[in-house]
Image (cartoon, rainbow, N blue to C red):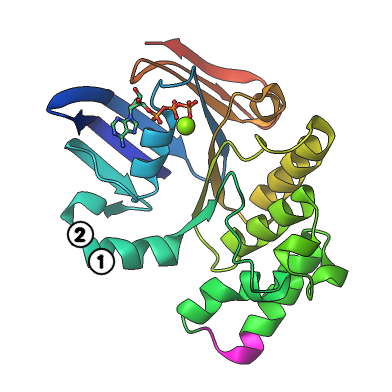
Amino acid sequence: MDTVVLKRASKTYHLDSVGVSALSDINLEIRSNRFTVISGPSGSGKTTLLNIIGCIDRPDQGELIVAGQDVGKLSDDAVSDFRARHLGFIFQTFNLLPVLTAYENVEYPLLLSRVPAAQRKQRVETLLEAVGLAGKGRHRPGQLSGGQRQRVAIARALAPSPQLVLADEPTANLDSHTGQAIISLMRQMQRDHKVSFVFSSHDPQVLAAADDVVKMRDGRIVSIQRRDENEHVIEDCAL
Ligand SMILES: Nc1ncnc2c1ncn2[C@@H]1O[C@H](COP(=O)(O)OP(=O)(O)OP(=O)(O)O)[C@@H](O)[C@H]1O
Ligand SMILES: [Mg+2]
C-alpha cells in the first residue's frame, strides 16, 4: 500500500488579492517504507507539497490519503491528532527545544502521547543509542554540534513510531561530510524502523541515496524516477 496518495491537488496562496499558484494538479503516490526525495528549483513548490503531505496545510482542491486515512474528511483537531500519531518531522534548523536536554527533546513527543514512563525511558535510550548519541543525553542543543543536533532531531521524529517522516532540506545547514553521515543514518533508520521518509532537497548526496525522486517545476511534477533495492531504475516517467 502507498503511504501517501495525492489526487489532483492544488494550492494557491493569496497575497494582496493576487493569487500565486504554488501547486497545480498534483497526482502522486509515495511508496511505503521507501526514501522519496522531492527536488526542483527554488519556488517550484517543494515546501508547499511537503506541508500538504505532512498535514500542516490543506490543499484548496484534491484528495489526500495518508496511511490509509482520507485527511480531507478530518476536522482540524482530528488532523492534529492524526499528525502526532502517524507523522514525524525533521526541520532544517533542527527546531529542538533549547532548554531541554537531548534526552528530554526525544522524550517530548512521547510525553505528549502519554507513553508510560518505563516505556518512554527505554524508547529514548534505544533511539539515542541508534543515532550514535548514547553519551550525550544530558547535553542541551547549544552544547551539541550541528550534526549532533540533527541526530537528536532524527531520534525525536522517530520516537512515536510514525509511519512517515518528513524533512524540508535536512542537510542544508550541514557541511557535506556531516551531511553524508546524516544521510547514511537516515537511510539506516528508514530500513530499521520500517518507515517512509519524504524529503525535499537539492543536495546531490540526498538525491543519490533516494529510492524515488520526484522533480518539480512551477508547481507541477515534471518527472518521477523510482529505483528498486538494487538501485535499478524500475520507473522513469516524464510528465
Ligand atoms: N505563505 C505564502 N504566501 C504567498 N506565497 C507563497 C507562500 N509560501 C510560498 N509561496 C509561493 O509559492 C511558491 C512555492 O513556494 P515553496 O516555498 O513551496 O517553494 P520551494 O520549492 O520550497 O522553494 P525553496 O527551494 O526556495 O525552498 C513560490 O512562488 C512562493 O513564492
Ligand atoms: Mg522550500
Dominant secondary structure of the residues highlighted in magenta in the image: helix
Viewer-nearest residue: 216 or 65: 216
- How packed mark 2 is, by other alpha carbons closer than 10 Å (few <14, some 14-19, many 20 or more), is few
Question: Which quadrant of the figure shows ligand 1?
Answer: top left
Q: Is residue 216 left or right of residue 147?
A: left
Q: Is residue 59 left or right of residue 166?
A: left
Pick out the residue farthest to the top. Answer: 238
Q: Position of residue 232 (x, y in %)?
A: 66, 20
Secondary structure at numbered mark 1:
helix
Which stretch is magenta? Answer: 115-119
Amino acid type for the residue under numbered disc 1: Ala
Mark 1 residue's CB less than 8 Å from ligand 1? no
The residue at the point 80 percent across, 53 percent down is 145
Q: Position of residue 124 (x, y in %)?
A: 69, 74
**30 is higher (above) or lower (below) than 118:** above
- How packed mark 1 is, by other alpha carbons closer than 10 Å (few <14, some 14-19, many 20 or more), is few
The residue at the point 83 percent across, 60 percent down is 132
- The answer to whether residue 118 is magenta is yes
Q: Where on the picture, by quarter, is residue 7?
A: top left
The residue at the point 37 percent across, 11 percent down is 239
Pick out the residue farthest to the left. Answer: 17
Q: Which residue is mark 2?
A: 74
Amino acid type for the residue under numbered disc 2: Leu
The quadrant of the picture occupied by the N terminus is top left
Distance Cα–Cα, label 2 vs label 1: 6 Å
Q: Which residue is mark 1?
A: 78
Q: Position of residue 22 (x, y in %)?
A: 29, 26
Pick out the residue farthest to the bottom. Answer: 117
- The answer to whether residue 211 is magenta is no
Q: Is label 2 in contact with label 1 (beta carbons under 8 Å)?
A: yes
Secondary structure at numbered mark 2:
loop
